[in-house]
Image (tube, rainbow, N blue to C red):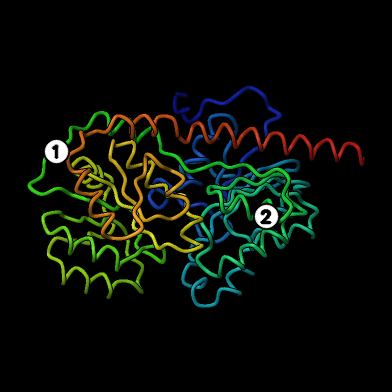
Amino acid sequence: MRAEMPLGKRRSDVTQPTVFAYEFPGPYEAGESRQYQLLKQMAANRRVYFISTIGRSTRSPFPRFSTTRTSGDVVLITRRTPRGFDHLARTIPVLARMLNVTGFLWFLRRHRIRSAVVATTDFTNLWSAPLLGIRWGIDFIDPPFLGTFADMRAAVRSAAPHVSFLTATASSLLEVAVEAGVTSAVHVPNACSGESLRLAESTDRTETEHPVALYVGTIDWRFDLPLLGELAGSLPDFRFEIAGRINGSLAPATEELAARHSNLRFLGAVSEEDKATLLAGAVAGLVPFLRNEVGDAINPTKVYEYAAWGLPVVASATRACVELAPIVTVGRSSDELVVQLREMQHRPRPDPAAVEFARANTWADRALVFNELVDRAVTEQRSQRGAIG
């Protein structure tokens, strides 16, 4: 197991490219998000700066970039949508994307950046690649909220000629990249943080009157609400605790479901302290995602967090969850999931196999892989420029 790398300790090699967090949220928004954790760990080996081209943020864990002029190689890790543009992205997505690309291009040109390796979840930024002659490195995570899986395939296909490398969280995403002609495509799944492991190790497990099945995460387009209702109805002696922000359009459905099942609670967003209490008292972690092409492409970060707390995981049989067996136990029907939850309430807590899995899959390990890919891509770009010049 590699130890989590502390912030602030950097290698002395000054040739390492700088990492810019472009319009990136602070930890109060990011939590266990992949981008935040990758940046945090990459900061151990190189400089990481926060860029805000639209609006202001004062809570970033990274120093703000204030140099008025620079040039050379950079790495950019971007938000999906610029701060303050979430509503616009939902109502007028084309305009929001244009504004995002405009801000991105403005930053690159202002700082005279000649080449870049870019990790992005927003494919709209890739439109600018032919204009700038930039080769991208793409961190390919969850499918987009807007559009279909076919749209995503088309976006990757159009970006493939400009890609130095592509990392994918799920096998199906990796296949999209290979089909599109990306020669350097690497499977880099999600992970858990060292902080989660340390907090779990120092927290006593609590006994509850009824066994608790817990979901931690956003309630959105991925979530299978009918399946959750079937589980709550079939296991009246269980308590189903659902902790996380509820997307506005799903609020009425969650209220109706909770009214029908007294053993089901939607808690909304919870504090880190409350989340720890819930994790310490649960007998199993839930991943009740819809089984479809998009669900198959989601490598759930929550699986790794559950594992850090030693929780066995019960999930819908999406492809990504099937591939996480045996740490994840999947069910193809609510009846199968009911049997599995019954069995899990009798397992020891914490589950040693789950904790060992978490220790072998930390963001520190993922950042080392990502750093190597970035360094290789930047070195190749420098060599190409030298050959041309």
- Against 59, residue 354 (above or below) is above
- Against 203, residue 76 (above or below) is below
Label 2: element kind: helix
For residue 384, which quarter of the picture?
Answer: top right
Q: Quadrant of the N terminus?
A: top left
Q: Residues within 10 Å of mark 2 (few under 14, many from 20)?
A: some
Residue 257 location in percent, x, y?
22, 70
Residue 196 location in percent, x, y?
34, 36
Instruction: Look at 47% across and 64% down and name the residue there.
Output: 292
310 to the left or right of 27: left
323 to the left or right of 99: left
For residue 379, which quarter of the picture?
Answer: top right
Q: Depth check: give the residue in front, 141 or 328.
A: 328
* Type of amino acid under label 2: Phe
Residue 95 location in percent, x, y?
60, 74
Q: Earlier in the sequence, mark 2 or mark 1?
A: 2
Q: Quadrant of the C terminus?
A: top right
Query: Would you name the residue on which mark 1 appears?
Result: 206
Q: CA distance from mark 2 to mark 1?
A: 50 Å
* Type of amino acid under label 1: Thr
User: Mark 2 against mark 1, which lies toward the viewer?
Assistant: 1
Q: Depth check: give the residue in front, 141 or 318.
A: 318
Residue 202 location in percent, x, y?
24, 29
8 to the left or right of 30: right
Instruction: Look at 16% across and 58% down and name the residue there.
Output: 235
Q: Residues within 10 Å of mark 1 (few under 14, many from 20)?
A: few
Inspect this view and state whether residue 274 appears. Answer: yes
Query: Would you name the residue on which mark 2 appears?
Result: 107
Label 1: element kind: loop
Q: Depth check: give the residue in front, 307 or 101.
A: 307
Q: Depth check: give the residue in front, 59 or 7.
A: 7
Inspect this view and state whether residue 58 appears. Answer: no
